[in-house]
Amino acid sequence: MKNNNLFAAMRAAFPEDLDAIAVETDNGLYYSWRDLERGTAMLANLLKSLQLPEGARIAVQVEKSVEAMMLYLATLRAGYVFLPLNTAYQSAEMAYFIANAEPSVVVCGRKNFGWVSKIAFQQGTYNVFSLDDNRIGSLLDRAAQCSDRHEVVPRKADDLAAILYTSGTTGRSKGAMLSHRNLADNAQVLKDYWGWKTGDVLLHALPIFHVHGLFVAIHGALINGSKMIWLSKFDPKLVVEKLPEATVFMGVPTLYVRLLAEPGLTREACRTMRLFVAGSAPLLIETFRAWQERTGHTILERYGMSETAMLTSNPYEGERRGGTVGFALPGVSLRVQGDGGQTLPAGEVGGIEVKGPNVFQGYWRMPEKTKEEFTADGFFKTGDVGKIDERGYIHIVGRSKDLIISGGYNVYPAEIEGYINDMPGVAESAVVGVPHPDFGEVGVAIVIAKPGSTLDGDAIIAALKSGLANFKIPKRCFVVTELPRNTMGKVQKNLLREQHKALFAG
């Protein structure tokens, strides 16, 4: 019987010369393919030694490092379920994820070990390890005592490989369950569609706690047996310096905007590059054109989400059209539906629905929510609004109502409003997204005080910073006497967006 473990597919693509360089880091370290093989084996054996239950979740909130990537690969290899968590998450968020996912193992940075382990122990998770980005931590100390030989645990195609938490418009996050098939199929399709070939080198400058950096980038390189140049954080100067050693780069639009501000970004700097990919947020047409003029390269924009990995892509061969996300990938069915449930013709705007081997298994422990998000004929409702033009290119024209995408991260206003509304003296709040030159979009909070109370916008933002990830914090907070409403009493966020749209202009 075929082993459908995703790690087995990636391991099979390792080059014959295991002593060749697999990863080169920005602090002068080199990891061979043999190092990846041995390191993942030792970590997998450590997990195995803990005698975890079948389908155990391994929750990981650590800074980006090659060892953190190895922990992801080891989790797959050992047949467990990986749960990546944004390093910006604070105590309230971590408490929710640990309570909801009930991980058997939690791995965090040493500086957070005190409070994270306390939350984990309270929830009944007793295996808590530390891992820093400088190869220090109890995880590696323990793994060093384990064998460096390990048989990849057999997995069925539909067995869970990862759970990615994605905020819901109603506030609390939902865990999207992705199987070995979901991830392996998407990796293979992208390998072919984007023309990965022998000798490709990926310049990896994304975080590794969400789809783009963890799945699209890492899977792309590994399933092609390609070397990675590994940057712990995005540094535009360093990226420009490293471009002549690479052939593939992936980034969110914010990264491309920052690279365009570098005088060193020239056609000469990009002479070895084959492919620039953008996603996770809309790429402005100005950025698309400026990149073409400066570098001679056309950015390939694609579209995906936590629940589906990649869904569409501009073509590798053929016209890449700015302002579009290309065509549905091979194996993906995509349609645009009207309010009445009818499939709309070209040019008409409606809800985007998708079906395919990459579409997730449902939301963790939320059967009702899962049922709600799928149509009777098995299509997933993305919540995005778009259209297909006369040439078949897909345009995303809006998003499920209020979602704010700031620097490539999803921010759901309902979650932020919940925290603000719980603050003393707050009667009501509304959070909306407005354009921002650097992040694409940022949140702005508009708050009403309870009678007799006095509120300070800066103090509200400061209070949010102690409990929420920085990317979720509104950039400004205004205290007003009333919010605009329709006849049904619903807050008209479109008017608030309009009112504040020029806040960060220029």
Image (cartoon, grey):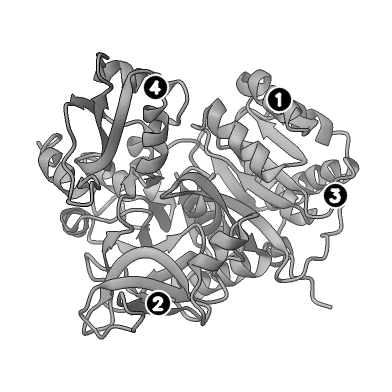
| Disc 2 target residue | 328
Q: Position of residue 390 (x, y in %)?
A: 21, 84
Q: Which residue is mark 3?
A: 53
> Which of the 4 quarters of the picture holds residue 95?
top right
Q: Amino acid at mark 4?
A: Met
Q: Secondary structure at mark 2?
A: strand
Name the amino acid, label 2: Ala
Q: Which sits earlier in the primary sequence, circle 2 or circle 4?
A: 2
Q: What is the distance, in whole Å, between disc 2 and disc 1 at their CAs?
A: 43 Å
Front residue of 171 and 12: 171
For marks 1 and 3, the one nearer the N-term is 3
Can see residue 265? no
Looking at the picture, which amino acid does disc 1 mark? Ser
Labels 3, 2: front one:
3
Image position of 506 (left or right of 146)? left
User: In the displayed structure, would residue 98 be above or below residue 321?
Assistant: above
**Looking at the figure, which quarter contains the C terminus?**
top left
Query: Mark 3 is on which residue type?
Result: Pro
Residue 364 on image: x %, y %: 63, 55
154 w.r.t. 111: above or below: below
Q: Give the residue displayed 33% in from the left and 77% down from the top.
A: 336
Going from N to C along the chain, the mark reached first, 1 or 4, is 1
Task: Give the alpha-carbon distance from disc 1 to disc 4, as whole Å.
Answer: 27 Å
Q: Residue at x 44, y 76 (%)?
A: 329
Q: Nearer the viewer, residue 161 or 141?
A: 161
Residue named by callout 1 = 117
Residue 63 % position (x, y) = 56, 33
Q: Of circles 1 and 4, which is in front? A: 4
Residue at numbered disc 4: 423
Quadrant of res 28: top right
User: Mark 1 to mark 3: distance in Å?
Assistant: 20 Å
